[in-house]
Image (spheres, grey):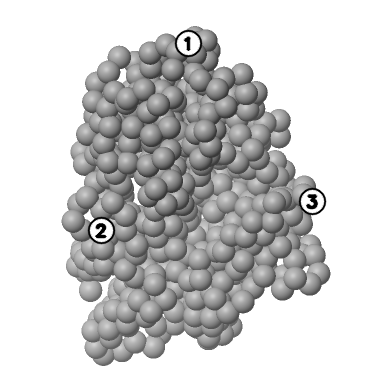
Amino acid sequence: MSKPVAWLLALLWSAGCALAVTAAAWPADRILGVRNNDLYGALWYRWYLAESLERGWSAAVTPLVAWPLGTDMLVRDGCNLLDAALALPLVAWLGPLGAHDAWAGGVILANGLAFFRLSEVWRGDDRAGVAAGLLGAALFALAVVPLEELGAGRPTQAFLPFLCLGLRAAWRLDTERFAWAWGGLWLALTGLTYWYAAAWGGLVLLGVGLTRSPRRAVAMGALALALVSPLLALVATHMAHGPGLPALAHPDYHPLFVLDATGWTALISPDGGLTTVPAGMGRVVWGSLPLGALALGVLVRRDRAWVAMAVAATLCVGLALGPRPLGLLDSPLYTAFLALGPLADRMWFPTRALVVVDLVAAAAISAAAARWLGRGALPLAAALSVGWGLSLVPGALLPLPTWRPPHPPALDWLAAQPDAAVVALPVGADSLWRVHQVWHGKPVQASLGGSNPLLAVDGHAEWAAGQPALALLDEILMGRKPSRRFTDADWQPLLDDGFGYLIVDTATLSADRTPEMVDLTVKRLGRAVGPPTRQGPGLLIWTLPPGGDR
């Protein structure tokens, strides 16, 4: 089969996978992902990066959140902004909401096409070989871990084409002169997209590379490290001396992961709060892993690269089991990873390492299929691809959940008002202030860590403690009568720090309160602060100062 025809089929194949994922978000006022903190962040990060570039601000330290102190994004989450930067043309063309779904489709499309390119190393260009590549592309484009990430509003962790291209380069180290340079570049780009993907993806690339040319494999790894080292060193230095995600190496934050038949449950907060990793992750172990292992069993005797991939997948499963597999003995593998430094010890979700199992399983099945498929290879590959997609439906991986972000007209009014910072309340992890900020575009006092003190900006709690108006507002939002009346002096510190507006997100208040409690809170706000300047569904806006003694 000619290469143009094969690539046209790969494009259509991967586009079909992308369509299967994104169709759930039609009509256009809905976006992929369950309503949660991470989905708000996905919308916000693209806006913040575009806003920073437009205003000539550094993307590493932004005044847009935790005003007036600002936020060090290197500390907050490592400044992984490559995928947000790649999505900026879509934001300019389609706006924040349209760009989100278009980028999600682009993630699936890119993963499928990159895997098809990878499959060239173990298949031929005949019909059976192309069909095997297409089957693998569908398996990886609709892999469990990336779909879980997209469904949870985390496209960054689902974007993996650079990893596939890096593995292709590693596979060709002994036959292509500059494969080591391409492999180093692709591995570096994987890290700039998501640091931890490069950590466990690097196990696969370096393992395969060592079976081809140890010297070039070392050169590939050294180049990748050299390319990312300026930013990596900066991130590690900032994380070592500033707040952000707690270091898991610290015993107070040491998580306990328990594996069961559906997924992992992680104890990740010092107050004992439980976070359940989505149940679909269990499909990697009970689905992808056995199928991939079966295919690997056929291949390992033919090429040492498959042995290296099997070892890498095994190590990643061990890492994903966390610090104490099955609640028994401490894992030396996990402990060793945390000891690598200030960035490694903040890996809160080791289950993401299972994406290597997805990749190795898809590769092994594709390579085995290239040997087994005969006549009727394309129809059979199509049937198997569709069957894989349908198998994801009972596990709630397809269709993905969707959400309709609010866009009250009052926020457009606020966007047109003179520049001043916004007091956005409440500030919990579930509050909508980041979505609101995408529309109004003004700095806010809220922190990306919400109300979690572990994730707070250094000095922000002390700043808030010196704001009497915030203390009185918090009393009202907590369902209590204010302890005293507001005065002009209460608002003055906020005015001195450049604040000009107050937003109260009543939609978030409604999530855990009865309608009667919300109505009472709104009435108390009206009596204490005065009537809002603008209001809309789930939203109240005041200009500051609201009007003297009240």
Label ID, residue 251: 3
Residue 234 in the image: x percent, y percent? Answer: 62, 31
Relative placement, left or right, of 376 versus 276 is left
Q: Mark 3: which secondary structure?
A: helix
Residue 426 in the image: x percent, y percent? Answer: 47, 37
User: From what the image shows, is residue 501 above or below residue 449?
Assistant: above
Q: Residue at x 50, y 76 (%)?
A: 283
Closer to us: 76 or 34 = 34
Q: Mark 2: which secondary structure?
A: helix
Label ID, residue 488: 1
Label ID, residue 25: 2
User: From what the image shows, is residue 317 above or below residue 402?
Assistant: below
User: From what the image shows, is residue 414 above or below residue 322?
Assistant: above
Closer to us: 111 or 265 = 265
> How much space separates mark 3 and mark 2, taking CA atoms?
42 Å
* Dot 3 alpha-carbon crowd within 10 angstroms: few under 14, some 14 to 19, many 20 or more: few
* Dot 1 alpha-carbon crowd within 10 angstroms: few under 14, some 14 to 19, many 20 or more: some
Residue 107 in the image: x percent, y percent? Answer: 35, 55
Q: Earlier in the sequence, mark 2 or mark 1?
A: 2
What amino acid does circle 3 point to? Pro
Given this view, does label 3 or label 1 mark the residue nearer the observer? 1
Label ID, residue 475: none
Closer to us: 259 or 236 = 259
In the figure, residue 410 lies in which quadrant?
A: top left
Pointer 3 and pointer 1: residues touching (CB < 8 Å)? Answer: no
Task: Count up the numbered dots.
Answer: 3
What amino acid does circle 1 point to? Asp
> How much space separates mark 3 and mark 1, taking CA atoms?
46 Å
Q: Is residue 56 visible?
A: no
